[in-house]
Amino acid sequence: MDKYKSIDAQLVGGKRDTGSTASQIYYLTHQILKLTSHLELHSEDYSSRRGLRKLLGKRKRLLIYLSDENTVLYAKIIKNLGLRGLKGR
C-alpha cells in the first residue's frame, strides 16, 4: 500500500486532490487491483466481475480525456502505474 501512496503523492504534487483526473485514475487502478485479486479466488463471482468491467471502462474514459488534455501527465501516469497505453494514442 505504501507504493500506491507514494505514486499518488508524485502524481498530484503531494496534495490529496481526489477530484483531479490523475487521482481518480490512481484510485480506480487501486480498486481494479483489489477486485482482480478477489476474482482470482472467487472466479464465479459475476457481480464483482461486472463491477470490474465498469471500473475498467471508467478508467479508460478518464485516460482518453487525460491524453487529449495533458499528454505529459498522461505519459507520467502510464509509466508510474505500469499501464499499457491506449491504442492509437
Image (cartoon, helix red, strand yellow):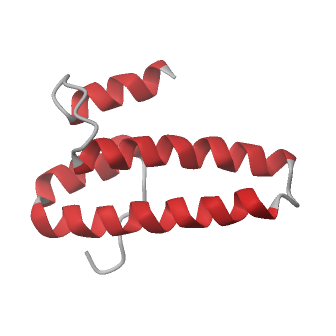
Q: Position of residue 40 (x, y in %)?
A: 80, 49
Left or right: where does residue 43 sit relative to residue 34?
A: right
8 relative to 40 in the view: left or right: left
Q: Residue at x 23, y 54 (%)?
A: 75
Q: Is residue 70 above or below residue 61?
A: above
Q: In terms of image quadrants, where is residue 66? A: bottom left
Outermost residue on the bottom side: it is 88
Q: Position of residue 37 (x, y in %)?
A: 71, 43
Q: Position of residue 83 (x, y in %)?
A: 42, 54
Res. 43 image quadrant: bottom right
Location of the C terminus by quadrant is: bottom left
Task: From this view, report whether residue 21 is shown above or below residue 7.
Answer: below
Residue placed most toward the observer, 39 or 80: 39
Q: Residue at horizontal 30%, vertical 41%?
A: 23
Q: Nearer the viewer, residue 1 or 50?
A: 50
Q: Which residue sits at x=28%, y=70%? A: 64
Left of 20 or right of it: where is 6? Answer: right
Residue 54 vs residue 81: left or right? Answer: right
